Image (spheres, helix red, strand yellow):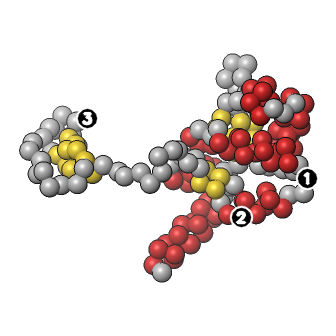
Amino acid sequence: MEVEKNKKAGKAKDIDSHSKKKGRWIWEPEYERHFKESYVRMFQHALDVVAKDKALSGETLRIWMKLLSELEDDNYMQLQQTKISEEMGIQKTHVSRAFRQLMEAGYLEEGPKSGRAKSYRVSPELAWKGSGDKYTEVMEKRGKLRLVKLQKAWNEDNRKK
């Protein structure tokens, strides 16, 4: 297939590549990323809640920020507290206490184990890294679909303005 040279950057894509039919093509523009690094969606109300939480010390807030920086898709991360302790120059007992405080506050959850290693998940009510569809699925399972619908309605209202 010949593609016009004046088209924006992108590529021709065979939309039937996984079926018996062949030969239907579409132009798939190259998505221009605004951010060169990966990012996490953080909800403003969550920032407010965490900022006002007097039970969290400076070290705990530093560890919270480190955890947000380590998020993988669907808010999971596999971290060793010892590694965080070494990287951040914080005593392991303080890291352990920070994890406990974050879990008690509901900001951090224990995820599934992979062998001996623990995994953790940041509460999706506070932040999200992953697709919007997966976020909706996770929130439905948590019985929080109403929150998702309110956020979608708010987004649509703001787009109209």
Dividing the picture into quadrants, the one containing residue 146 is bottom right
In the rendered structure, find residue 55 and report the number of the disc placed on it. Answer: 1
In the depicted structure, whether residue 121 falls above or below residue 82 = below
Disc 3, SS: loop
Identify the mark nearer the N-term, 3 or 1: 3
Give the residue at mark 2.
Answer: 45
The one nearer the camera, 8 or 28, is: 8
- Assess whether mark 2 and mark 3 are in contact (beta carbons under 8 angstroms): no
Q: Give the residue displayed 50% in from the left and 49% down from the top.
A: 131
**Left of 136 or right of it: where is 89?**
right
Q: Residue at left 25%, top 35%? A: 18
Residue 158: where, in percent of width, then height?
Answer: 52, 75
Q: In the image as oriented, which residue stretches furthest toward the left?
A: 2
In the image, what residue type sits under mark 2? Answer: His
Q: Callout 2: few (<14), some (14-19), or many (20+) C-alpha neighbours within 10 Å?
A: few
* The N terminus: image quadrant: top left
Give the number of callouts: 3
Q: Which mark is residue 18?
A: 3
Vertical relation: 125 (above or below) 112: below
**Which of the two labelled residues, at mark 2 and mark 1, occupies the earlier sequence position?**
2
In the image, farthest residue toward the bottom:
161
Q: Residues within 10 Å of mark 3 (few under 14, many from 20)?
A: few
Foreground disc of the pair 3, 1: 1
Residue under the image location 37 percent in, 52 percent down: 32
Q: Can you give x and y, in whole percent of width and height, for residue 53 in the image?
A: 86, 58
Type of the residue with mark 3: His
Q: Secondary structure at mark 1?
A: loop
Residue kind at label 1, given as amino acid type: Ala
